[in-house]
Image: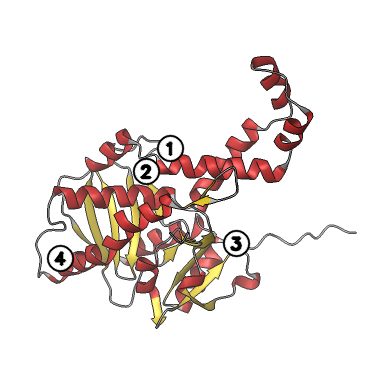
C-alpha cells in the first residue's frame, strides 16, 4: 500500500470552497514581508509532509492516522456543507440525518481542532522542554538503569528528540478522548452566515477558535463556544444553547470578530477577498516597533 506524503491539516474539502478560480485561493502568512497576499493552489497550503505519519524504528512510516482522518471525516465534509446550505435556503429543516451523523460531525470538529500544528506545537514544545530538560539523563539513570554512551548520544540528539516528539504527537492525536467527545456531544451545533451578502469568512491554519465568558472556563459551560468556517458563507459552532439546530445571521461586527480571532491564532489564512485578508493581516499581525536605539 502506498504511503501518503502530503498531509493537509485543513482538508482540501474545505479549502476548495475558498477558491477564486479552479484550485486557486488568496493566501497570506506571518512569514511574508509587508503582509503580502498571493495566489496559491490549495494543494500547497495548510499541509506538511508526513505530518501524521508515525516513524518506526527502521525508518518506515505508518500513515494510518492520516487515512483515518480522510475516511472517517474528510470524505463527509462536502455532504455536511450541502446539508447546511439547504438549511440556510429553507429547503431542509434539520442539520443531520440522524444522531450517528451528528456524532460523526462532532468527532470531526474535535479532530479538526487538534490536528493543526498551530494548536499542537505550543503544547508539544512545552512537553519536549519538560521531558528533555538539562538533567533528564541523570534522572532516568537514578530511576531506571545506567545508560550506554551510545544511548546518551541519541537522547541528546535534537533530531532524535524531534522524532520522539513527533511520534508522541501522532500517538496522542490518534487517541480519541471519550470524555471530551461526550462533553462536545452535549452541546448544540449552530450554523451561521454573514447577514450582508458582501461579507464573508476566511479559512485559517488554526481553523477552530474558542470564545468564553471567563478565562479558562470549562468546555460545556454556558458562554463557551467553539467555531470553525467551512465556506466563505458558512461557519459552524458548538455552544450550550436550547435550540440544537440554531441558524444565525451574523451582523458585521460578529463576522469580523470571528475572522479576527481566526487570524490572530493562526500562522496563515486564506480566502477570496484580497481586501479582507489584508485588513485582517494588519489587525492580527501588527508590525513590531522599529528599534530606534543608537548603534
- Distance in Å between CA atoms under marks 2 and 1: 7 Å
Residue picked out by circle 3: 286
| Dot 2 and dot 1 residues touching (CB under 8 Å) | yes
In the image, residue 121 lies at what x, y percent?
Answer: 55, 47
| Residue 36 falls left or right of residue 108 | right
Quadrant in the picture for the N terminus = bottom left
Quadrant in the picture for the C terminus = bottom right
In the image, residue 16 lies at what x, y percent?
Answer: 37, 73
Q: Which mark is residue 87?
A: 4
Q: Which mark is residue 212?
A: 2
The foreground one among 14 and 207 is 14
- Distance in Å between CA atoms under marks 2 and 3: 24 Å
The answer to whether residue 89 is above or below residue 169 is below
| Dot 3 and dot 1 residues touching (CB under 8 Å) | no
Q: Answer with the quarter of the image where residue 291 lies.
A: bottom right
Label located before the other in sequence (4 or 2):
4
Q: Which mark is residue 215?
A: 1
Label located before the other in sequence (3 or 1):
1
The foreground one among 168 and 106 is 168
Label located before the other in sequence (1 or 4):
4
Label located before the other in sequence (2 or 3):
2
Q: Which residue appears at 67% of the width and 22% of the height?
A: 140
Q: Which mark is residue 7?
A: none
- Distance in Å between CA atoms under marks 3 and 1: 24 Å
Amino acid at each position: 500500500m502506498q504511503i501518503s506524503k502530503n498531509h493537509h491539516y485543513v482538508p482540501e474539502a474545505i479549502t476548495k470552497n475558498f477558491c477564486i478560480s479552479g484550485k486557486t485561493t488568496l493566501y497570506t502568512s506571518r512569514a511574508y514581508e509587508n503582509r503580502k497576499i498571493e495566489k496559491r493552489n490549495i494543494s500547497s497550503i495548510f499541509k506538511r509532509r508526513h505530518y501524521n505519519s508515525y516513524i518506526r524504528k527502521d525508518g518506515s512510516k505508518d500513515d494510518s492516522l492520516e487515512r483515518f482522518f480522510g475516511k472517517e471525516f474528510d470524505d463527509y465534509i462536502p455532504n455536511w456543507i450541502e446539508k447546511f446550505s439547504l438549511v440556510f435556503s429553507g429547503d431542509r429543516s434539520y442539520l443531520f440525518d440522524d444522531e450517528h451523523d451528528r456524532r460523526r460531525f462532532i468527532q470531526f470538529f474535535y479532530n479538526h481542532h487538534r490536528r493543526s500544528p498551530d494548536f499542537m506545537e505550543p503544547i508539544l514544545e512545552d512537553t519536549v522542554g519538560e521531558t528533555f530538560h538539562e538533567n533528564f539523563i541523570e534522572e532516568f539513570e537514578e530511576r531506571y538503569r545506567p545508560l550506554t554512551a551510545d544511548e546518551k548520544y541519541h537522547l541528546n540528539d535534537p533530531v532524535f528528540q524531534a522524532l520522539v516528539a513527533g511520534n508522541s504527537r501522532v500517538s496522542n492525536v490518534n487517541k480519541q478522548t471519550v470524555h471530551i467527545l461526550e462533553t462536545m456531544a452535549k452541546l448544540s451545533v449552530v450554523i451561521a452566515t454573514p447577514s450582508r451578502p458582501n461579507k464573508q469568512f476566511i479559512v485559517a491554519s488554526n481553523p477552530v477558535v474558542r470564545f468564553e465568558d471567563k478565562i479558562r472556563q470549562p468546555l460545556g459551560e454556558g458562554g463557551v463556544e467553539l467555531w470553525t468556517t467551512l465556506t466563505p458563507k458558512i461557519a459552524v459552532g458548538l455552544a450550550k444553547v436550547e435550540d440544537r439546530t440554531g441558524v444565525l445571521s451574523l451582523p458585521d461586527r460578529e463576522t469580523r470578530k470571528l475572522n479576527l480571532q481566526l487570524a490572530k491564532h493562526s500562522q496563515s489564512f486564506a480566502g477570496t477577498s484580497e481586501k479582507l485578508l489584508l485588513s485582517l493581516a494588519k489587525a492580527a499581525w501588527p508590525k513590531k516597533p522599529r528599534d530606534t536605539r543608537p548603534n
